[in-house]
Amino acid sequence: MRKLFTSESVTEGHPDKLCDYISDSVLDSFFEKDPYARVACETVAGKGQILLTGEITSTAEVDLESVVRNAIKEVGYQDENLDIDYRTCKVLINISKQSADIAMGVDQSYEDKEGQNIASEGAGDQGMMFGFATDETDEFMPMPIYLAHKLSKRLTEVRKQGILDYIRPDGKVQVTVEYENDKPVRVDTIVISTQHTEQTDLEMLKQDMKEKVINGIVPKELLDENTKYYINPTGRFVIGGPLGDSGLTGRKIIVDTYGGYSRHGGGAFSGKDPTKVDRSACYMARFVAKNVVANGYAKKCEIQLSYAIGVAKPVSIFIDTFGTARIPEAEIIKRIEAKFDLTPRGIMNTLDLRKPIYRKTTNYGHFGKPELAWEQIIDF
């Protein structure tokens, strides 16, 4: 049976991703000085203004306005007439401390209060978190999101390296992959919309996208005469970034994970320290799911972990191997419980999450990057 599946990615200059990057830059700036900082910050961007809001409790002193402007500069925004200028934009700071009601549940777990001797903080919120892995790529990621991220990253590279000097920071990519009997066999459609300078010739842009971006990323065997290309299909994309559309932290949760190929619990990642299990437990669920597949227990695996605020141990563990398991799923769960500490402290210790690593996660997906701790393969 043949079917089509589509995933999208965006460049670091997309207004939502700009906000994610600012929020993770704030988190890293605190973790550089205080690895036990409690950070939950969000960014709003639009029309020459940046609003940083949320809750931060820390012993560290951080110049938040400088962090915000620096992050915008790193992305490459410096023209208020086309997108936003890191030098002239208005930066508003609205930060308070973490609620004492939340802090008391995180500082001491429910189990510890009840004398159960569980050495861990409580979860920072309730919720369900998903992790996923498949053997259809070397990175154990679904092919559509894997290719979409590679293309959007390449779009940024040709801009920052000066290969295509007319490209601006904002951009989006979409890839449709055709599957036959659950295996990717060809790329059906590629969509690229990239911001560009006023004088750019559209036909030259289309040619450059194929030659300088697509051809070096998408394997030739996946492209054929029927592959469809939609490159800047509106014909013009000069105004971009927060000037063209407002941005908000946490609005690209499907881009951040598996491109819609797996379920999502709804929690966003950026700007949150690892006591927030909607970030850290998703990383752990990916770590577990990837190792289920890498160790040969299944060809495809989805893990759900669910938590209650203030409680250390997950309320439930669910696994779905989509009929690909080589041993019973109940046995896989037993092995997971025996191998992995799924409490907040266990997750933070296993993945070494109290470090300023979060800028590296923001763009082009939080999964599939081999340098990240939750992408490592272990025996279990």
Image (cartoon, rainbow, N blue to C red):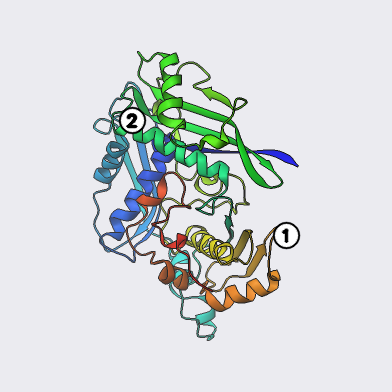
Instruction: Determine if residue 62 is in view.
Output: yes
Kindly state the secondary structure of the residue where label 1 is placed: loop
Q: Position of residue 258 (x, y in %)?
A: 56, 48
Residue type pointed to by label 2: Arg
Please provide percent x and percent y for residue 307. Answer: 58, 66
Q: Nearer the viewer, residue 283 or 117?
A: 283
Identify the residue position indicated by label 2 in the image: 159
Residue at (41% x, 47% y) in the render: 362
Q: Which mark is residue 246?
A: none
Q: Amino acid at mark 1?
A: Gly
Q: Residue at x 25, y 53 (%)?
A: 62
**Residue 244 visible in rendering:** no
Residue placed farthest to the front in the image?
Answer: 221
In the image, what residue occupies the spot 59% across and 64% down? 305
List x then y, in percent, for residue 180.
70, 42
Res. 238 image quadrant? top left
Q: Residues within 10 Å of mark 1 (few under 14, many from 20)?
A: few
The quarter of the picture where residue 145 lies is top right
Q: Are marks 1 and 2 in contact (CB under 8 Å)?
A: no
Which image quarter is the N terminus in? top right
